[in-house]
Amino acid sequence: MWVSKPIYESLPYFYLVAGVVFLGASMYVNHGHWPTICFAVGLGCLVAGLVVLLKRRDYRVTDRRTSQRQDH
């Protein structure tokens, strides 16, 4: 599936914001199992956002190094 570049680039930040929102909601929602669900989803979103950010950073650093080697 192809998405436009602005959407692709903003996706990890969306995950991070959604994670913060769900973690915040887990403190205020007090009906049944919803606090636990919000906490788990929030934590999962934060981890997913960080993983995507770090993977992209590592790939871009590695890709930059290999392209510089090929230029020489």
Image (spheres, rainbow, N blue to C red):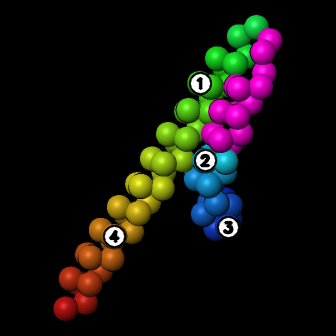
Label 2 with label 1: CB-CB less than 8 Å: no
Query: Dominant secondary structure of the magenta stretch?
Result: helix
Quadrant in the picture for the C terminus: bottom left
Q: Which residues are magenta?
A: 18-31
Horizontal side of residue 6 vs 59, given as left or right:
right
**5 displayed left or right of 72:** right
- Three-letter amino acid code of the residue under disc 1: Ala
Is residue 22 rendered to the left or right of residue 66? right
Marks 2,4: beta carbons within 8 A: no
Q: Are marks 2 and 3 in contact (CB under 8 Å)?
A: no
Q: In this figure, which residue is indicated by the disc labeled 2?
A: 16
Residue extending farthest front: 27
In the rendered image, which quarter is residue 69 located in? bottom left
Residue 61: mark: 4
Q: Nearest to the eye among marks 1 and 4: give it.
A: 1
Q: Is residue 59 visible?
A: yes
Q: Secondary structure at mark 3?
A: helix
